[in-house]
Amino acid sequence: MQGQSADAECSEEYYTTLVNREFRASASTRTYSAVRGGQAMAVKGADRSLGGTVHRQDCLCYRRNPSGSLYTTPEDLDAFRLECGRWRIRGVVTEMGLVPKTIGMRGGAAIFAAAFMLGGVSGGVAGQTTTGQTASGQKMVSHDPAEPLSGKLPVKIAARPTGRIARKTVDEKGMRSLISELVGCGTRLTLSSWDDPKRGAGCARDHIKARLDSISASTGGKLQVVVDKFEMTAERTGGKAVPLENVYGILPGTDEKLSKTIFVVSGHFDSMPSFKDIMDPTKDAPGADDDASGVAVSMECARLLSKYAQAHGGLRSTLLFAAVSGEEQGLLGSTHMVEWIKQQGYTVGGMLDDDIVGADMAPGAPHRVRLFSGNGDLDDADSPARELARAVEEIDGRTSVRMVFRQDRYGRGGDHYPFYKAGMPAVRFTEPLEDYNHEHQTPRTENGVEYGDYEKYLNFAFMGNVALDNAEALRELAMAPVPPTKSRLGGAVKPDAVVSWEAEDDAERTGFEILWRETTEARWQVFEFVEKAGETVLKSVSTDNHFFAVRAVGKNGARSIAAPTEMERRAPPGPTK
Ligand SMILES: [Zn+2]
């Protein structure tokens, strides 16, 4: 589609409360820029701040376009004028939907973001928009009544926190050297030696502890290093109790109330040979990807955030950077960690499991990391895990994270699971497309095929991205107020929905965002901002056409994870038996 431009009359508040913005697309360079509030704002691929906040604002306006995409045809434009004639939109969009498939994810971030803002992409960067259709090729229908019926002003949306962790500060070399040390331990099978400094699980523990000690020493000593020793019994320990150890770096929160809320990032440092050898510590098990990579991500988060905390006077909530053992024997270390955290009196605000996050072998790498989240037991699939996944995606951006609405890969398990089963917000990061020749394989060559989980298959550019995604998510979550509690939806069989919730006092909170989404949508949008907890009536909004949630917003712009509303569910009347 070639460029079309349009002017439509628009009310004053659009300019003042939304964004005075102009999009331009250049056919020759395929770059976009925006003018925001009269100031030129370069929109480069590397600018990941375009992930959530900005497009949410635009959606409020563009949603009013009945075709779902901004003037793709003259007919759409006419409908658009009719529907939101009081808005003034200035824009020139060229080549919408012709985003080349060869553009790297990060390089294409701006294009993706711009395309999304204009409603042209729903399926991904490679989405092909055709005239009058959405990216998925589906013609959108526009004969639903608007809710609310009229007159609602756009929402004022606070900017996300400043001071994002820069990609260039991620130390890929440091991650590589830790993985080399761990692979150098030969095997890290949980049943191997905990005393031999050269080979086995104890060798790995020593390297991880040394890494955390050095981070602590170089960042003012706030990071506390703990080696947690315990015993566990499982089928894969031969049915007898065996010794295990986890290593933790704890960065205490600075806020009196929030310091008892803990955000966890974890990788497992144990490795295993092929399944037939799973009890055999004499077999090599390099485990570079599974899961020295996750340990390296967790430790890099410890370094980045300890540095950040030192420079900025700390983060509100406590952070736990974990490397656990016994994963391959049945999630033993993480199951124990859940108990350990409870015993220390913490509430888990969120848990990020990084397991198999080091390789990205498909052409076109680096790709997006996958982020798995389970449904929980709730009717509307809004589990704490799902809300954490949505929060992470919003912080890191859709071009960085690929949400998968599934607890884990089929037939697989991970250390987020014990947290998830306990009803906590816990998710799993895993590389885009796994190669099973390099996971859980005793190193060997068979029929010319090499098996084994070696460093040479890793992609450190990808792994550095994953470290950044984790670290930035942890940073913003640890800056945020606690989520609201008791969020409820009332107003069934009445014209207005009523959302209510409670929240503890928090001097650093500016208010709350009421979120909603179509029942078929994956992501929240901001419906309204309100300053105080209590009850808000959503005038002319049905309880039945959307899902609702509430989240807290800090003065610093950090958002808590969302607290979906629950409502009393009554079955319709039926025959008496
Ligand atoms: Zn693993």
Image: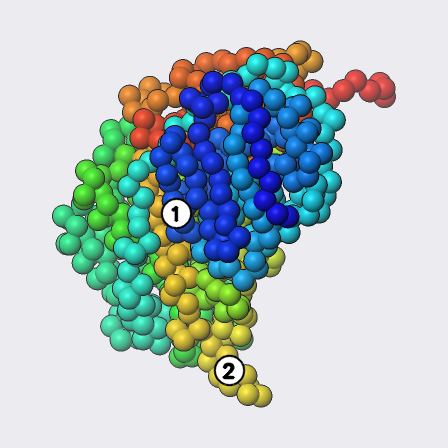
Q: Position of residue 291 (x, y in %)?
A: 41, 63
**Disc 2 designates what residue?**
450
Q: Position of residue 174 (x, y in %)?
A: 27, 64
State left or right for residue 409 relative to residue 355.
right
Q: Position of residue 54 (x, y in %)?
A: 45, 35
Which amino acid lies under the numbered mark 1 shown in the image of this protein? Asp
The one nearer the camera, 342 or 39, is 39
State left or right for residue 391 relative to residue 546.
left
Contact between marks 2 and 1 (CB within 8 A): the answer is: no
Q: Residue at x 61, y 57 (%)?
A: 410
Q: Secondary structure at mark 1?
A: loop
Q: Residues within 10 Å of mark 2 (few under 14, many from 20)?
A: few
User: In the image, is the residue at mark 1 within 8 Å of ligand 1 by its beta carbon?
Assistant: no
- Earlier residue among tags 2 and 1: 1
127 up-or-down from 272: above or below: above
Which amino acid lies under the numbered mark 2 shown in the image of this protein? Glu
User: In the image, is the residue at mark 2 within 8 Å of ligand 1 by its beta carbon?
Assistant: no
Q: Secondary structure at mark 2?
A: strand
Colouring style: rainbow
**Disc 1 designates what residue?**
47
134 up-or-down from 465: above or below: above
Q: Residue at x 51, y 86 (%)?
A: 445
